[in-house]
Image (cartoon, grey):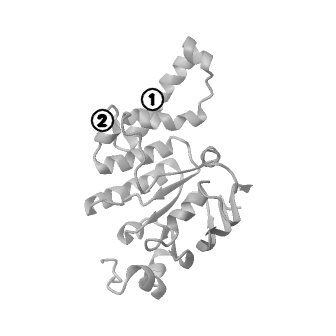
């Protein structure tokens, strides 16, 4: 059984079919990229895979469990968490506190223990602080733990969003255009980070992105959407050379060697 099985996923908004018959099977440890032009339905797929949208039809199964109809927080508790194309940090909270907030879904301390400051509560807080700092260290943010999130450079804000998502202990990490707005050197750094996260955390990753030069070296498989339909899927090299992809997404000026 695959870790994630998505079958015949379709969603209608009035008379508009935003995603039509989307199918995806993901094995543990894979990195799958979903690409396509603006309006292709990529983020809509992510919104269904995280409970923000309920599909009109189709199934989503995580480890064999039916996920359709669950709330977003229930998706997160089951093991599917995400970042957003438009960064959604707690801007006036510190870097460390942004990551800590993601741990609340696993918190089992009751209100009385919090007020009484029991030994167990204090020990739990200390362990949480150590875990947060360890995670920030691995993502290159430890020296900025006390900074307000809004004061971080753009690239570090992206890293912080990923750190917060990892704090939920996900089985599957969904990255929504993780390099949107970045310059070329930042793309290379983020590609290395995504590869590191996959290796060090053993997490399965599904990402959506526009930058082909970012996606091609790191993805095991690529799916291409256009107007809500899957028009191609397979190994990066095969997808890159597919005439339907070139026509719908890359455009006639895209060179086969990967340079726009």
> Which of the 4 image quarters holds residue 188?
bottom left
Relative placement, left or right, of 183 versus 37 is left
In this picture, is 48 found above or below 140?
below
**First of labels 1, 2 by sequence position:** 1
Relative placement, left or right, of 3 versus 214 is right
Relative placement, left or right, of 184 versus 97 is left
The residue carrying pointer 1 sits among few (fewer than 14), some (14 to 19) or many (20 or more) residues within 10 Å by Cα, namely: few
Which secondary structure lies at badge 1? helix
The C terminus - image quarter: bottom left
Going 51% across and 67% down the picture, which residue do you hit?
Answer: 42
Of residues 173 and 111, the one drawn nearer to the viewer in this rendering: 111
Per the image, the residue denoted by label 2 is: 143
Q: Cα distance, mark 1 to mark 2?
A: 14 Å
In this picture, is 116 found above or below 238?
above
Where residue 132 sits in the image (x, y, percent)?
A: 44, 34
The answer to whether the residue labelled 1 contacts the one labelled 2, judged by CB atoms less than 8 Å apart, is: no
> Which of the 4 image quarters holds residue 108?
top right
In this picture, is 22 found above or below 182?
below
The residue carrying pointer 2 sits among few (fewer than 14), some (14 to 19) or many (20 or more) residues within 10 Å by Cα, namely: few
Q: Is residue 30 visible?
A: no
> Which of the 4 image quarters holds residue 14?
bottom right
Relative placement, left or right, of 32 versus 15 is left
Going 36% across and 83% down the picture, which residue do you hit?
Answer: 256
Q: Is residue 109 visible?
A: yes
Going 48% across and 54% down the picture, which residue do you hit?
Answer: 198
Where residue 1 sits in the image (x, y, percent)?
A: 71, 61
Where residue 136 sits in the image (x, y, percent)?
A: 39, 39
Going 47% across and 64% down the picture, which residue do you hit?
Answer: 208
Where residue 148 sits in the image (x, y, percent)?
A: 32, 35
Which mark is drawn over residue 130?
1
Which secondary structure lies at badge 2? helix
């Amino acid at each position: 059984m695959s870790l994630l099985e998505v079958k015949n996923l379709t969603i209608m908004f009035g008379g508009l079919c935003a995603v039509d018959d989307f199918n995806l099977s993901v094995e543990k440890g894979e990195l799958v990229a979903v690409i396509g032009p603006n309006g292709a339905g990529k983020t809509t797929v992510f919104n269904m895979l995280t409970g923000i949208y309920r599909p009109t039809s189709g199934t989503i199964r995580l480890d064999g469990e039916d996920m359709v109809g669950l709330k977003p927080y229930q998706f997160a508790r089951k093991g599917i968490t995400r970042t957003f194309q438009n960064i959604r940090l707690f801007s006036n909270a510190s870097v460390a506190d942004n990551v800590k907030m993601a741990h609340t879904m696993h918190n089992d301390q009751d209100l009385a223990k919090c007020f009484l400051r029991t030994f167990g509560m204090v020990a739990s807080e200390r362990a949480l602080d150590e875990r947060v700092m360890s995670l920030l260290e691995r993502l290159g943010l430890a020296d900025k733990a006390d900074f307000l999130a809004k004061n971080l450079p753009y690239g570090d804000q992206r890293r912080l969003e990923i750190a917060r998502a990892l704090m939920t202990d996900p089985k599957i990490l969904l990255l929504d255009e993780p390099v949107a707005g970045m310059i070329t050197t930042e793309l290379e750094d983020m590609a290395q980070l995504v590869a590191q996260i996959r290796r060090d955390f053993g997490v399965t990753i599904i990402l959506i992105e526009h930058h082909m030069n970012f996606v091609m070296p790191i993805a095991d498989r690529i799916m291409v959407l256009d107007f809500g339909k899957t028009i191609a899927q397979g190994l990066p090299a095969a997808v890159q050379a597919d005439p339907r992809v070139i026509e719908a997404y890359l455009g006639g000026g895209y060179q086969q060697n990967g340079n726009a």
